[in-house]
Amino acid sequence: MKLRLAVYTLVALALAPLCALAAPPRAPAASTDLSATDQAFLSARDAVRLGDRARLAQHAARLSEHPLAVYLEYWQLLGRIQTGEPGVAADVAQFMRRHADSYIADRLRFDWALQLAKRGDYPGFEREAAQLLPGWWTDDSQLLCYLALSKYRKAAAQQADVFARDARQLLANTKNSAGEGCLELTETLLADGRVSIWDRVRALVEQNQFDTAKRIGARALDQSGRPVDQKMLTQAIERPSAWLTAHERRLTEMQRELAMVAIVRLARDNPQDAAEHAGSLHLLLTPEQRGIVWGRIGHMGALRLMPEAHGWYRRGGEHVGVGPDAARVDEVLEWQVRSALRAYDWKTVKSAIDRMPPALRDDPTWIYWYGRALHQAGRPAEAEDHFARIAQQFHFYGQLAAEELGQATALPLRAEAPTAEEIAPFAANRGFVRAFKFYELGLRLEGNREWNWQMRGLNDRQLLAAAEFARKRGVLDRMISTSDRTKAEFDFAQRFPAPFRDSLIQYSAPLGLDENWIYGLIRQESRFIMDARSSVGASGLMQLMPATARYVAKRLNVPNFTPGRVNELEVNLQLGTGYLKMVLDDLDGSPMLATAAYNAGPGRPRAWRSALSRPVEGAVFAETIPFNETRDYVKKVMSNSVYYAALFDSKTPSLKARLGTVSPKAAGATELP
């Protein structure tokens, strides 16, 4: 019973997580502000989380006319799917027919498909998976693993190698490969001898899945057919440094594999120690094995911005990151490029990008840096060809590429405003009705799913009309995301709105802050949701953490400040701009470093800057920020600021000038939170 309850609760939670920026367009209404039916709906949602199916059924019986009644029906069916109740298949099919072409029907089909796969009904799984909206569930690792397993199981002999190769690559680059689908795929490939045990063990160790790594590793046999020593395997994973110290002089074939596991494990915590052990073992490893261990050490060192990382990557030679089964090959190669950028080694930048898989190589990031490497190699015509591929795209690297071609950032011609007739159909759209009800209840993530579902297949005119509909309803984040989807007609006033400008200038101007930068930051922080609340507790337009708000309020002597006032427009702007000025001054007036500090805290950009061995251009510094979230955040904020400048000013803005140059400087200490 406990297991079934836990499964039901986890699946329900997966439907409605409260994550970053999952906040309503206004503060969640107090229970006294909600209707009785809305309170009952939220109570039913709580029952789902608790696995209380009886209470859920009681509420569902009373809420058949509620705008979100379909979710109550979905939650009930989901519980029955998990417990395998008789007749549930027919009820699932009926639900999907009655609610065809809706998000929640596709969601139920997704859940049902996974359940069929778990039961071993692969024909049924394939039938349902084939009807899922293309591209909607492609980030779910378990669905992808079941799809790979299904294709492999029914492949003809001549195709099995191809599907097995694709499955191995999927497993190697899937961070959550311990779920049921990926484990079953692993077991099948292992049983058929189509995956290397040691490749899987290393990949699992890299993913911190140590128990699964030990279980898989226990199957390994040496050349004489003897099983791996369980004690040695455990020590290589749990005490890698001790194992390597004891065994690095002489290695059998199996011990070489264990040594690689130990080095991969050690590199996570101490790349320098891992490098010393790898150096001792270097001549005992094959070129391919060297590529694996030095690539991993270089990757971990690059994430720490260690200057040695570039040399560690180079010790792996051309074998770093190659091979279809290399774990997280994309990340390894991306960080080799970043490490080479910090060293201004353009030859390695080019060679590492050359070794990327085609899909990754065609990412605008690497198109831009490849163009820069070609230019440094004295091949300007080829470089310009690369820049031209992305120069018309509206993003950070599109802007930089345009500047490399001598083109100023220019806004596209504004599309004709949507008419009332174009906007009218959206008011009656059931998906939008559900979305706005979710927003009203403070369940923004669920509302966004419903909204995004309605964007399927819309042309540019319809997207602009839907964006205007969102603006009229005061949901600026949906206006931005919807307008961002257009391909040929553009309205950058929708994409980059500037509400409450007088209030913003009131607080930014006395501090000498660039309003374009502040708007660029707010657009990224909250998408202008007045009381957005992140998963870590940041609040309001400028997403202030409680401790930061208290600190700034005290520094600025804000009268009558209480934590509950953080979401007030004037208070949030006063505290947010005040803090932005503090981090800007703390980081020598660099907007880019201050942007990084606003996201990751002021101590981290100081540490990242101190790791430099030479001055670097701002774009290089931004590309080599070791936190994925902060790296993406800085690029978007700085790019946003250029577009706001183009909207507000007649002068031509320059992204490169805004990024500036970052020089090495001791980290020192800061009192800022």
Image (spheres, rainbow, N blue to C red):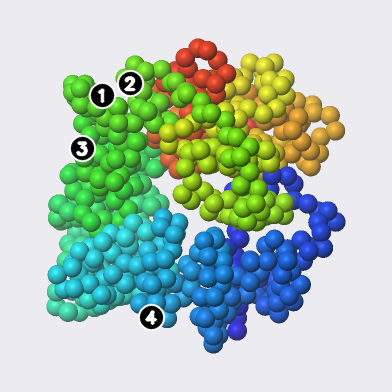
CA gap between label 3 and label 2 equals: 21 Å
Q: Quadrant of the C terminus?
A: top right
* Quarter of the rendering containing residue 346: top left
Asked if one can make out residue 89 in the rendered structure from this viewpoint, the answer is yes
From the image, tell me which residue sits under label 3: 351
- Tag 4–tag 1 contact (CB < 8 Å): no
- Tag 2–tag 4 contact (CB < 8 Å): no
Camera-nearest label, 3 or 2 = 2
What label sits on residue 404 in the rendered view? 2
Helix, strand or loop at label 2? It is helix
CA gap between label 4 and label 3 equals: 44 Å
From the image, tell me which residue sits under label 4: 120
Question: Mark 4 or mark 2, which is nearer the start of the sequence?
Answer: 4
Camera-nearest label, 4 or 3 = 4
Residue, x 46% and y 25% (percent of image)?
412
Q: Is residue 660 above or below residue 484?
A: above
Residue extending farthest to the bottom is 86
* Disc 2 packing (10 Å; few <14; some 14–19; many ≥20): some
Residue, x 52% and y 48% (percent of image)?
455
Helix, strand or loop at label 3? It is helix
Q: Amino acid at mark 4?
A: Gly
Question: Mark 1 or mark 3, which is nearer the start of the sequence?
Answer: 3
